[in-house]
Image (tube, rainbow, N blue to C red):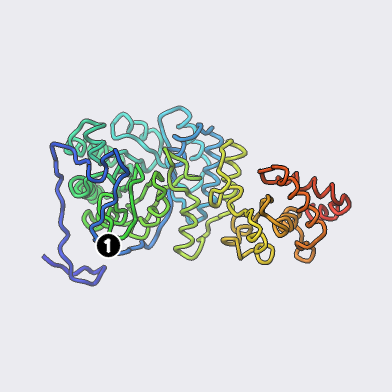
Amino acid sequence: MIYFNKKSNLLEDTIYHYELQDVKEPELFRELFDYESIPKVMFNNRHVPISMPDEIWMTDTTFRDGQQSTSPFTVKQIVDLYKLMSRLGGPKGLVRQSEFFVYSKKDKEALQACQDTGLKFPEITTWIRANEKDFELVKQANVAETGILVSCSDYHIFKKMHLTRRQALDQYLGIVKSALSHGIRPRCHFEDITRASFYGFVVPFATQLMRLSRESGIPIKIRMCDTMGFGVSFPGAALPRSVQGIVYGLRHYAEIPSELLEWHGHNDFYKVVSNASTAWLYGASAVNCSLLGIGERTGNCPLEAMAMEYASFRGTMDGMDFTAITDIADYFEKEIGYNIPPKTPFVGRAFNSTRAGIHADGLLKDEEIYNIFDTAKILKRPARVSVNKTSGLAGIAFWINDYYKLPEEHRIAKTDPLVVKMKEMIDAEYEEGRNSSFGDDELVNLIYAIDFHRIRELEAFSL
């Protein structure tokens, strides 16, 4: 039967409604996941339309999934990071929510301390397993929304939980109804969705959730969890691994509005950012992230990366404070003792630093040639040069100008006698077998040795 779709202004088929397929044996997609080889990507050349929502935003799981992979944060550290996260998201709350555990005494103290800040964003939510005992903890937490773990692949339903699909569905619906009866918004975490039977379990379950939502008048969110990082965004890729196929299928067949769809990915195959961006492009309003991408195994989608993606897609930072990204990175390293790999985009100490002489020469002439954007203005991270055996005269000159913050009219050229002498001394060390870069203190000491009076002139600009 056909009908006129007022959204597309086209005649379309009536949406087909899928029923639960309660199979006796688990569907493990062994042609894709045989476990003894690299998982395969299958294509069916079916393409779905891009459908970017009117509004998109980020949510956070630093204090839930993220904290599972690091040394436990103190309550003070959680509060400090929560405030920085709020600053990053800006007045529009583009970092919309942050989820917390509720199991230990410290979990509850941290949640309460963040609530006591009075910040509107990120909204504080919780996470529980799908059982009544966990739900009792949520009722005590004074939150409006909770995440509920609802594993949806047969790997989990059959092999971990030892249930049938029908039994799992009934258990999940029971805890969702409990949440609704107490006026708490459920957010259902469809764990392992990229290995799940999409039309046999995912869509029928989502359809029932939407029915409950309509009956209760309470929105029920669905978090699409790419738990093992199997999701792919290639055009024409087949389910269950197709990110755009999952998003489109839930919107089209289960009739879930964009604002109730959220993507949660892991980085096992280096696809976490592209998959999250794809989820936005094809109709999910929210992408779930963590600060610095911390999380189970290879980690979650970095919050700072998706803030950049947001600005790229929308053409505006929309009130976000990107300098908070640098302050978050500094806090992790100085206060928490977390080691950020130096070349990590946006947050690593050397992400916009070059060692190549030809690049340094370009930076010396015009920073825009070899810097991705004005990192000093946007991130409080000016372009840097690390001096080593390939930096050349230009690299040394750029380092001096940057380190001493020399104004344009006082910047020195690569032909300056000081630069030439420093290069001679640096080259000599590498000739003798040195293989590490020069630190700032070492370079300062070289200038002292070469021209004691010159360094006083340089230091006057950095005071």
Where residue 55 appears, as percent x and y from the top left, is: 39, 60
User: SS of the residue at dot 1?
Assistant: loop
Crowd around label 1: few <14 · some 14–19 · many ≥20 (10 Å): some
Where residue 259 appears, as percent x and y from the top left, is: 34, 55
Q: Residue at x 40, y 56 (%)?
A: 277
Single out the residue that lies furthest toward the left: 1
Residue 215 shows in this picture: no
> In front: 10, or 355?
355
Q: Residue at x 56, y 61 (%)?
A: 372
Where residue 364 appears, as percent x and y from the top left, is: 69, 63
Against 154, residue 231 (above or below) is below
User: Where does label 1 land, which residue?
Assistant: 48
> In front: 118, or 301?
301
Against 205, residue 137 (above or below) is above
Disc 1 marks a residue whose amino acid type is: Val
Residue 320 shows in this picture: yes
Q: Is residue 20 left or right of residue 287?
A: left
The part of the image, by quadrant, that contains residue 160 is top left
Q: Is residue 85 left or right of residue 425?
A: left
Q: Is residue 110 left or right of residue 282?
A: right
